[in-house]
Image (cartoon, helix red, strand yellow):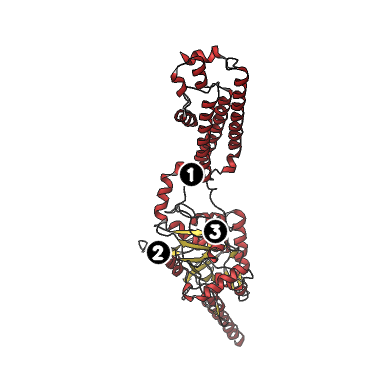
Amino acid sequence: MELKMLSALGSFVIILACVHAQVTRPTTTSSSKSSFKVTTILHPPYLEERPRYYPSMQGNQMYRGFIKDLLDRLAEKGDFDYTLNTVEDGQYGSSDNGTWKGMIGELQRKEADIAAAGLTVTPERLAVVDFTRPIMTTGPTILLKKEQGYKYNIYAKRVFRLLLPFTYGTWLLIVLSFVLTGLVLYGVGRLSPYEWKGRSLDEGFGEECKKYFNARNSFWFALSTLTWQGYSKAPRAISGRIVAGTWWAFTLFILIGYTASLTRQFIVPLPGHTDPPIHSVEDLASQSDIKYGTIEYGSTSAFFRDSPINLFQKMWETMNLDPSVFVNTTKEGIEKVKASDGSYAFIVDASIAEYESGVDEECELITIGEALSQTNQALAVQKGSPLLDILNSAILEMQHNGELLRLQTKWWDWSGTCEARKPTARGSTGGSRGKPAINVEVIDLAFAFIVLAVGLVAGLLCCVGEILFSKRHGKRQSYTPRNAVVEEDAS
């Protein structure tokens, strides 16, 4: 009897223990999956709330973005569930006398299991949390607002687009070549005894022939042949024909260069702004009109603070002279740039800067130069968490099969409202979608100018030879085929 009672009591204890274990099981989902708390920051395209016209959506469905899609794929591959929660102080993670704030602080205090955002891997953060494999490679870059005048300068640039194929120096040299050729043609026409003026006096072709290559008609000949229209009369003397022939060759080279460059100008769209006052971080550091700053306790400020490069050390000292250049959040920094008229530059991750400049409705934001350094962004977990291996395995698989790249392309596509941006490829620290059109410089047409110069000199020397030959032998001992050319022109 006692054995039966002991057996029944033992069975009751076992059943009670099983019930207790079931109640206290860490998973709370109907699918018996482990559920983890994810701390994050709202900032598109990483993560943002869906529009309010989705009232039926709750929980994770309220959000969209790169991080949301990434976590969905990781949860599917790792067979777990997650709950998104935005970090209370809106910070990524910084240390204040050993006390961590932001998402890193929540991980350290075990208030969250995963930190998922555009979180940069730094040595300080790596000392208190574990990071997964990189989900993106980026780096700090400069975000600036165009000055008011930039909006209107682009229209002037489009009005004079037909002049863009050549640089100012090239256009100036072409005009000088035209003037010089006209003067040489005029000089040869007046001095050579075998040109129209000399023949008209010597052979009685009429007074009209004297005007064929006077000053006005010499320049008209050069201009008409430059546009491939031709001129009713051509030089008759060898000296004049040398000048004309080299001018035609010069014209051919110029038109080829102009046409090729103009085609490129129309294929490559004009940027939505003129050149900004700065083009690189060196320009930014060497001037004083544009103030610059970053998130006060972010990874970018730590980059400047700890950098061994003199340029970045100088910039860090300059920023600390005016604490107002620092901001608390990325959103605050972007609003500060928009509120300025090109007088404040925000140094922020290129992934954010490029997105903001691409979707800006007023097309007022631009990125300057390349990324200042190459940094990795990753998910973070508690130190020693078994989640690290699960997430790393899933991220590695997504990297190998191209899923991660497709997600990046989806959320950083370049079909935004504004074309005035300088995008860089995800996973690199620079680059662009297409090479800009190049203006043809003087050096590119050097051969054409050399040919013309040689031709003009040869024409002048030949003209001198014609004068000497005429004085010694007389004009009627001409080398010009009169029967073929003179009769046609005189008729």
**C-alpha gap between disc 3 and disc 1:** 23 Å
Instruction: Classify mark 1: residues with Cα within 10 Å, few (<14), some (14-19) or many (20+).
Output: some
Q: Is residue 369 above or below residue 26?
A: above
Q: Nearer the viewer, mark 1 or mark 2?
A: 1
Disc 3 marks which residue? 369
- Hey, which quadrant is residue 342 in on the image? bottom left
**C-alpha gap between disc 1 and disc 2:** 53 Å
Q: Is residue 99 above or below residue 247?
A: below
Q: Which badge, 3 or 2, is on the more N-terminal residue? A: 2
Q: Which badge, 3 or 1, is on the more N-terminal residue? A: 1
User: Mark 3 belongs to which amino acid?
Assistant: Gly
Residue closer to the observer: 171 or 414: 171
Q: Position of residue 67 (x, y in %)?
A: 51, 63
Residue 57 disc label: 2
Residue closer to the observer: 70 or 323: 323
Instruction: Classify mark 3: residues with Cα within 10 Å, few (<14), some (14-19) or many (20+).
Output: some
Q: Is residue 18 rendered to the left or right of residue 211?
A: right
User: Mark 1 belongs to which amino acid?
Assistant: Leu
Q: Is residue 285 above or below residue 231?
A: below
Q: Position of residue 24 (x, y in %)?
A: 53, 78
Can residue 25 be seen at all in this image of the molecule? no
Q: Is residue 250 above or below residue 232?
A: below
User: Callout 2: helix, strand or loop?
Assistant: loop
Q: Which badge, 1 or 2, is on the more N-terminal residue? A: 2
Residue 164 disc label: 1
Query: Residue shown at 40%/59% (left/top)?
Result: 148
Q: Position of residue 149 (x, y in %)?
A: 40, 57
Residue 424 disc label: none
User: Mark 2 belongs to which amino acid?
Assistant: Met
Badge 3 vs badge 2, beta-carbon distance below 8 Å: no
Residue closer to the observer: 313 or 440: 440
Instruction: Classify mark 2: residues with Cα within 10 Å, few (<14), some (14-19) or many (20+).
Output: few
